Amino acid sequence: MKKQLTIALLSVTVATAQDLGDIASPTPEPTIIKASNASDLTNFIFQALPLSPIKEILLPKDCQIGFTNESSETTMEDIIVSYIDKASREVLFCTTAITSPKIAAALVAAKARGATVSGIMTESPNGIRNYNAPSYFMINNVPIFFDPTKEENQNNYLVLDREGVLVTASDWSVSALSGSNSYFAIKDPGIAIAYYNGWVNQLSTTIVPALTNSVLRTIMKNKVNKP
């Protein structure tokens, strides 16, 4: 059986190499790979190797894993907003960039209903012009801190009430959220505290914008003046 499978795989390899033009003769067709050929090859691989979908088993309690794409009924943007809306006391977020108006508005709304909201972001993300999310947050009394590393901040997660975490595969820009994406969410104090501590440790290395300093002073002043 192994010998037959090896011969079959070699046959597929040669056929693919010819389609890709790796062999000088015969001259390849103008189309590199036809969709039907690619589909046949994929089906063969799934049959020959243990890559078929496995029957799902129960996830840990209060854990969700999901995948979205352009045809999904629920978008990644809506999923992130739904988790922000569930938080009642604290929302700490860390991401490369936010250009989604829905997510930005949800974070400000969380602040308005009394939750502590703060974020770590990249100051000037590559490829995004007229980036004004940090200013939007700061003028709405949401303190923002800039990750100082040469490369962009690649963390993309929420810590919710120090009880749960939402981790996404991409940042929260409109272009990134509209493509294929995935997320992991769990309500677990141990995991939440691990991400909370990671956020706090990263915070100690961040750059504090001048406007954030002003916001923090206002917040502290209001706390002192409260009866």
Image (spheres, rainbow, N blue to C red):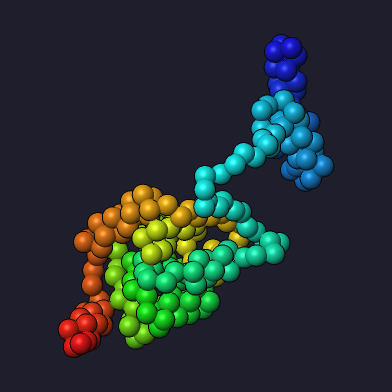
Q: Residue drawn at (79%, 45%), measured in percent from left and top?
A: 35
The answer to which image quadrant residue 153 occupies is bottom left
Give 78 or 82, whichever is nearer the viewer. Answer: 82
Q: Tell me if residue 88 comes above or below residue 14 in the rendering.
A: below
In the image: residue 127, left or right of residue 64 = left
Can residue 41 be seen here? no
Rendered view: 163 above or below 109: above
Where residue 10 appears, as percent x and y from the top left, is: 71, 21
* Frontmost residue, 39 versus 160: 160
Location of the C terminus by quadrant is bottom left
Q: How many marks?
A: 0
198 displayed left or right of 81: left
Q: Residue at x 46, y 55 (%)?
A: 187
Is the N terminus in the top left, top right, bottom left or bottom right quadrant? Answer: top right
Question: Horizontal placement of 217 versus 143: left or right?
Answer: left
Q: Quadrant of residue 29?
A: top right
What residue is rendered at 68% in x and 26% in y? 49
Q: Where residue 145 appears, x then y in whole percent?
A: 29, 70
Residue lying at 47% horizontally and 58% vertically, measured from the top left = 166
Task: Decide if residue 5 is in sight here.
Answer: yes
